[in-house]
Amino acid sequence: MSLLEKIIGPTLASQEEEEQKVGPLAGIPMLGLDALSSAAYGPEAALTLLLPLGALGLAFIGPITLIILGLLTILYLSYRQTIAAYPTGGGSYTVAKENLGTRPGLLAAASLLLDYILNVAVGIAAGVGALVSAVPALHGHILALCLLILALLTLVNLRGIKEAGVVFILPTYLFVGTLALTLLIGLVRAALSGGHPHPLEAPPAVPVATAGVSLWLLMRAFANGCTAMTGVEAISNGISAFAKPAVPNAQRTLTWIVVILGLLLGGIAYLCRAYGIAATDPDGATYQSVLSMLVAAVAGRGVFYYLTLAAVLAVLSLSANTSFAGFPRLCRLLAQDNFLPYAFANRGRRLVYTLGIAILAVLSGLLLVAFGGITDRLIPLFAIGAFGAFTLSQAGMVMHWRTHPARSPQEKAKNRVSLIINAVGAVATGVALAVVLATKFREGAWITLLLIPGLIVLFERTKGHYAHVAEQTRRHEPLDLSSLKPPVVVVPLRQWSTITEKALRFGLQLSPDVLAVHISATEDEADHLRQRWAGYVEEPARRAGVPPPRLIVIASPFRRLFHPLFDIIKTLEGEYPDRMIAVIIPELVGSHWYDYLLHNQRATALKAALLLNGDQRVVVVNVPWYLSGRKA
Amino acid sequence: MSLLEKIIGPTLASQEEEEQKVGPLAGIPMLGLDALSSAAYGPEAALTLLLPLGALGLAFIGPITLIILGLLTILYLSYRQTIAAYPTGGGSYTVAKENLGTRPGLLAAASLLLDYILNVAVGIAAGVGALVSAVPALHGHILALCLLILALLTLVNLRGIKEAGVVFILPTYLFVGTLALTLLIGLVRAALSGGHPHPLEAPPAVPVATAGVSLWLLMRAFANGCTAMTGVEAISNGISAFAKPAVPNAQRTLTWIVVILGLLLGGIAYLCRAYGIAATDPDGATYQSVLSMLVAAVAGRGVFYYLTLAAVLAVLSLSANTSFAGFPRLCRLLAQDNFLPYAFANRGRRLVYTLGIAILAVLSGLLLVAFGGITDRLIPLFAIGAFGAFTLSQAGMVMHWRTHPARSPQEKAKNRVSLIINAVGAVATGVALAVVLATKFREGAWITLLLIPGLIVLFERTKGHYAHVAEQTRRHEPLDLSSLKPPVVVVPLRQWSTITEKALRFGLQLSPDVLAVHISATEDEADHLRQRWAGYVEEPARRAGVPPPRLIVIASPFRRLFHPLFDIIKTLEGEYPDRMIAVIIPELVGSHWYDYLLHNQRATALKAALLLNGDQRVVVVNVPWYLSGRKA
């Protein structure tokens, strides 16, 4: 196991878990990266759709951003309440399930799972978009770069929460710092120049208009811009990662995230208009991200430009980390309710949910390959999951306040205010969801709409299966103690060795009826073993007064090893109708990870075949043999 | 297992193997695709290097091709002899090992393994190169297309040899047919026009010269052109796939392959010069493959053009199939000699070597990602492995004929002729290898030169490990029959169920000392089980006169399940110093593939933990419980 441990770190004991908790300073990078980094693709996604309007399009980015900021404020107030009401972690799944019922809960869960997967793909793709903006020579390697970053991220997350948090602190604050500085310089320049600053590096000319303004186009731009709000729910899902007192810590973290995000969105929108920066064709070879053009216009293409773009690349790529924290957590909640296989509830090495992380990495990798690593192609699938979960969560909170007990009139009034806030949130996000769905249906939203019911069916089937098994294995009768005869023991062997001897000896401890089976490729080999058997087994057994184990030798051409053994087992079952058949399989255990590659493949295959081909009366016994270099 | 079976086909029984054998007609696509398809990238690889010479470069493609054709003829004669001398499969590894010794054999094996991996990557990359030549709109998706084709190929190969062969017959003969027709039309046109045919679709202008002729440049072009010969050895490695009589069938197949390949290479070289077709920049956005320009010049960009290019795409992609047949075969040979883990020698489902196929797919996928799916970047790594294996194989054949017994003077003379042919082959391929190594060292050949010794070390270490284990487990003493006491049985349980009852009952059949261990999260749960235990187990046991199994309940916070169990096992080992400890773990077995995802994760983890943390005295007993819907 040493190689594996070097890569993913030593196994953590359970008591170390408390040390892994974080405060707001580390909480912002860990759970807020998704939300903050949205500033890097949300405005750009809206601007890309305004491209056909030419220069006029820039006039609309202001109003659209204002609507988005209003929605963000409502969302903030709603989620603050959710955090307080569900201090052990109030993800959309939990809130919707407890207040609206199982189906809405599963709907929220399915939406959120898809949102998490898309967030990984979009974050990485947008990060690589920033990279090729700064280094155009890399334009031909977009997909390879995306997959490389995904692999690195997966590794970091398999190492565990805390260290992952540390990796993310520096880039996050560098991102916020450099962007804030860019916006500040830009705003000062704009103010000094009466709203028309001169760019240090001129952005590409705004293309001429190819279409007129229409409400439909503006709604589509708004829908694209809504991706800037994805990730705000992550905190409410991850309260358990905060140090005590968890609720105020989580609320403070949320406040900071929303304030920073709002400032970034507003500043970017204002400066894009002031500097005349429109989006560029995302599929073209001259693609440049909006942030790249903005920073170059404000500060020139110097050291600061490259530092800022490096921070954007880092933060966008790492924004996927919000999903790596949230996806396995949600899978675990579903598994605890029997909606996903139990395996998702098992904590892996280093206290993270290995299986969830692995599945998230594979699915988002497939998305990246399918869409070539281009952000703009992924955007239509995005935001639906997020806004579906927002709406269900807020609606659930409305029900929560309706049934919440109030011990005083003050408390009752407070509940009432809370209810109104969440109701406004539910309606606002619901309307936004409707706009997103309507405007993006043909561009890819239908994929999301197909997958969500599919996931819900999967959840319900899984739960049904577990219920069925529990029904089958229920027992209300006492232990059956009739005819407790020892089993008939079968020991497959290849040669006389210490391993064989140990297996045989254990067989004799279990039962007086032991049968050794040797599948022989050549007659010589068989004769050799028969001779040894007589001297090494039969004679000493007779001397000790123990019934000697029988040796059965079967000639078999190459490879046919399992079937003769199964035939013998079948015969034994007929001979001994009231006995169990125990097959002893020796297993080599070594101290190195490569021992697992070098040994036991055949033992593992035989065990699997016995389980598949056997019946209730066949039992497999693994006798380990430890290679030296390990404890004896 | 039903989903898995639908995808990779039902498991084949061993006796069906003979039916999977092929004749020359199916043998050419199956084992010759690699060799034939080389015609599509070999000439182009040489032309790309002649690019700096401008129009003058085209004058040199003729002489270079002639040298390559000479080398190909020598190679053909040599391998014909190898097939006859090693009718059970005379790959370079076998021939070099038997005649030159183990180390040269391993050198040949390592070279060939790398060659197989590169062949997959180059074949797929060149196929996608043909595709983007025909459909320039796909230029941005080169890597994604490469990975998609790799995935499809892997799937086809996991389904088994014969069906794979059928998939390949049509494209291969379409490729040979369309290219032959193209060459024929081109040659007739050239003859009618006195050697200066007018292209129907003019190829891009030949760029102006940027460098003068040098021997070094010509040698590099020759080295690149040598990739046209890769794959010729595949037949000698795969004789076992031919129907009887295998040797003449294999030889006839080889003859056909070499004749077709030679005609293609010669025709392409002549027509490139006649039509004035030079290579285009492989990294550029206007890249077009040489074959694409040639077919367009000869026949125009009509239906025939697209049909031909489709065949080129199919055959180049599928040429990787030679590797998918050869790589697992070679791994198996190495595993049978203990140089690779035994697992490589296990035939998987459908009689193919699953593990080898999987590893080949992963490694060549990594190569594609690392080199962005561009053929030209992969070429420098290629050919070294192939020519290393060629040289070692021919040198081995020289030794073979030197020691070959001759019963008559005629036979002696015949052996002498054979020896000379193979000696010429060894020297010729050796010189070519030296040229390739010298000219491509800096461009990537050094990677190959580092990997080959690494692989050899791996092979030798593996063999050493197996020898070490055999030494450790050797035994020359008879069976130890002292103190055959029954084991102490431990049964971990969660609740009273039919599964628990079965495990407990089996425990009582093994030993009078049975201990049930329950890890309890809550006190309620513990009390509930204690009550049931008294009524369902202790009372009936006392009535039956059987020593009642003890129940141990341990309170444990969430997740800590294994450690309390290990503590108990440790205590028992102290209490019973001369007894084995048998831990009974029930396992659910279902009839559907998803049952494996839904159950037993904890049982599997517990078994693994017991083996890792246990010692020679701890034994694991798997008691299966079959879900209904399966045989009882």
Image: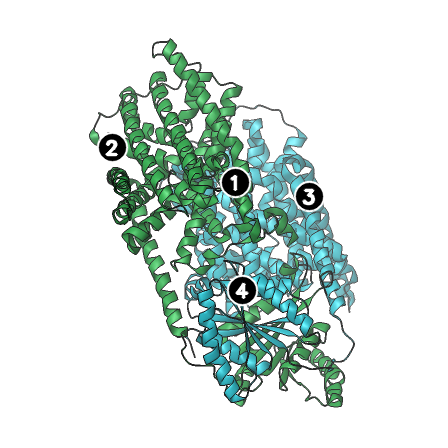
Chain colours: A cyan, B green
* Mark 4 residue element: helix
- As shown in the figure, which amino acid type bears the numbered disc 3? Leu
For disc 4, the marked residue is A604
Answer yes or no: are tags 1 and 4 on the same subunit. Answer: no
Q: Amino acid at mark 2?
A: Met
Quadrant where the N terminus of chain A sits is bottom left
Q: State the residue in front, A309 or B509.
A: B509
- Mark 3 or 1, closer to the camera: 1
Distance Cα–Cα, label 3 vs label 1: 23 Å
Counting residues from the start of the chain, the first of labels 1 and 2 encountered is 1
Q: Could you tell me how far apart the alpha carbons at marks 1 and 2 are, in whole angstroms?
A: 35 Å
- Residue wearing tag 1: B148
Where residue B534 appears, as percent x and y from the top left, is 74, 85
Question: Which one is in front, A4 or A145?
Answer: A4
Q: Residue at x 68, y 48 (%)?
A: A452
Front of the two marks 2 and 4: 4
**Viewer-nearest of labels 3 and 2?**
2
Q: Are marks 1 and 2 on the same chain?
A: yes
Say whether mark 4 and mark 2 are on the same chain: no
Q: Dot 3, how many residues are within 10 Å of its Cα: few (below 14), some (14-19), or many (20+)? A: few
Foreground mark, 4 or 3, reads 4
Residue at the disc numbered 3: A450
Of the residues under marks 4 and 3, which one precedes in the sequence?
3
State the residue position of label 2: B219
C-alpha separation, residue under disc 1 versus residue under disc 4: 32 Å
Q: Position of residue A449 (x, y in %)?
A: 69, 43
Quick check: A16 above or below A509? Answer: above
To the question of a shared chain for discs 3 and 2, the answer is no
